[in-house]
Each structure stands twice: as C-alpha cells, then as structure tokens.
Image (cartoon, grey):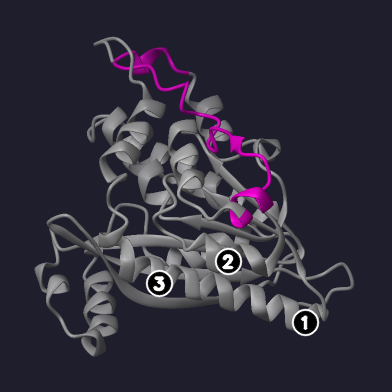
Amino acid sequence: MDSQHHDAAAIHVDRNRQSRAGWDSFSEHRARTTALIEAVGRRLESRTGSGVERLVLLGVGNGNDVDLPTLVPLFRSTTLVDVDAEAIAHCRSGLPAGIKESLDPNVLADLTGMLGRMPKGDWDAIDWNAWLIDAANPPHASAPQGDVVVSTCLISQLIDTVIQWLPPDHDRFADAILAVRDGHLRLLAGLAKAGGTSVLITDVVSSDTLPELADACDDRLPTLVRDSVASRNFFTGLNPAVLMQRLAAAAHPSSPSTAIHGPWRWRLGPRTFAVIGITMETKSADGDSD
C-alpha cells in the first residue's frame, strides 16, 4: 500500500489472513450465530411447509463465523459472498465434499461499491454529496437475493474501514460512517426476498472499553451490555436500537417484524466482543409476515 493510495479492500484481505487460524477461538460465537440462522431457516420452513430456497452469507470470509455443514442442508442453495477470493477458497477447502459440492459458485463483490473510491489524503477532491449518496445506496446486483440473507460481523468492519481512511476531525467523518452503515443495512434488507428474513449479526462493544465483558457470568451479560449502550459506550454507528430502527426503515414493503437476539461473547485474541443479532422478517407478496 503506497502513501498516496488507501487500499480499502486490502484491509479486509489482511484481516481475513490474520484470523484464518482462528476457528477454535470462534467456537462460542460460531455456535450462537449458527443457531440463530438455523432457527430462522426452520421458521421459514415451517411457515411455507417446504424447504427454504436460498441462504446468502455476506462477508463470509474464512467461514469461521458459521458452521456450514449444519446450515447448508437446510437450504436448497447457499451462496458465499466476499471481496476476498482467497478467504472463500479457504472456507470451502475445509468442508466435507458433499457440502462443498452443494454450494453455489462464489460471488466476489465489494458489497459497499465504495472500496475503490477512498483515495488517501485527497479528501477535498471528492464530490462528497455524490459519495455519500452512493455509499448509502450500494449496488444490489453484486449479490443474489435470498430467502435468508445474513451479514456476519461485516458492518463493523466496513465502518472501521472508514475510520482508518478519514481523520476523525474531517467534517465528513460522521456522515461517511453513517452512509456506509445505512448502505449496508439497505443492501441487507434489499437482498431478502418478499417473505424472507434479513439477519444482521454485529459486535457492538469490546473489552477495550468494557473490561468486565471478558469475565462476567453469562446471566449478567445482557445487563452489562445494555448499561454500556445506555452510557454511550459502543462502537461508532452501532447502537443496537438505532440499527434495528434503520434496518426496519430500509425494508420494502414497510412494517417488517424485527427482533433482537443475544448478546453473546466472541473471544478473539486478547479482546472479547459483545455480539448481537437482529432479525427482520419482511412481508410476503400477499402481505403476510407469519
């Protein structure tokens, strides 16, 4: 990465390489994530009385967040989407042959549409009005629609990419973060078919600013995270209540059914993260969501 170019995509590739050997450390997080997606799939299956057509996993990376051998048999097809071809190849390489063969072809895509539009240092040359509009409206064609569409801890990485790109005193810093956040929520909502479910899984705070997170008993975790959010101790742009509101606002048709799940812990090296899930069921073509 040279001094004149901020290679945003390379940041995501580098993160994937750093966490490639982290399968074991993801175990608690992966179990909770997989159980949530499985419950969503079972609910859709019971509602329709038949199998669920497609699962779409956005930003799947190395696959450490999900247990694909558990999830893939629940769906007629499963699509893995990421900007990092090397990570998806690693994800697929460790799967049993039958599971690997049943996956759709990989989709390699910049889900923001903006990773190539973050020039380092030349911020005044950017048409900020156009940039913010585009960031808030990413191209849906980069990934297929699904009955269950899942984003696993991707939104916080996208926000962190903006944080690494723009200095915090830049007058568009907050606007850029919120545009990328809202764009991802619009993408997640827009890719879910009518009658389908969007699943947003995200870390909201870490032991860096909430040290008690690492050792608190499981029963205390919800109160600990709720009090942390109430005191505005959460990752920039990732207030759970606002995420739920903005995801619902992105849905079409309106008035979807939303729910929050968790929190649970994700231990990654010396840091512990509090993770939540937000599910949003959209109305089917006949107007029913149940």
The residue that mark 3 highlights is: 31
Residue 39 showing in the rendered view: yes
Judge left or right: residue 163 versus residue 127: left
Q: Nearer the viewer, mark 1 or mark 2?
A: 2
Examine the structure image and report whether residue 114 is included in the region drawn in magenta: yes
The answer to whether mark 1 and mark 3 are in CB contact below 8 A is: no
Q: Position of residue 34 (x, y in %)?
A: 48, 69
Magenta stretch: dominant secondary structure: loop
Name the residue tied to disc 1.
47
- The mark nearer the N terminus, 1 or 3, is 3
- Residue 248 appears in the picture as rendered: no
Which residue shows up at 61% across the image and 69% down it? 280
Tell me the amino acid under the disc marked 1. Answer: Arg
Residue tagged 2: 71
The answer to whether 26 is drawn above or below residue 109 in the figure is below
Of circles 1 and 3, the one toward us is: 3
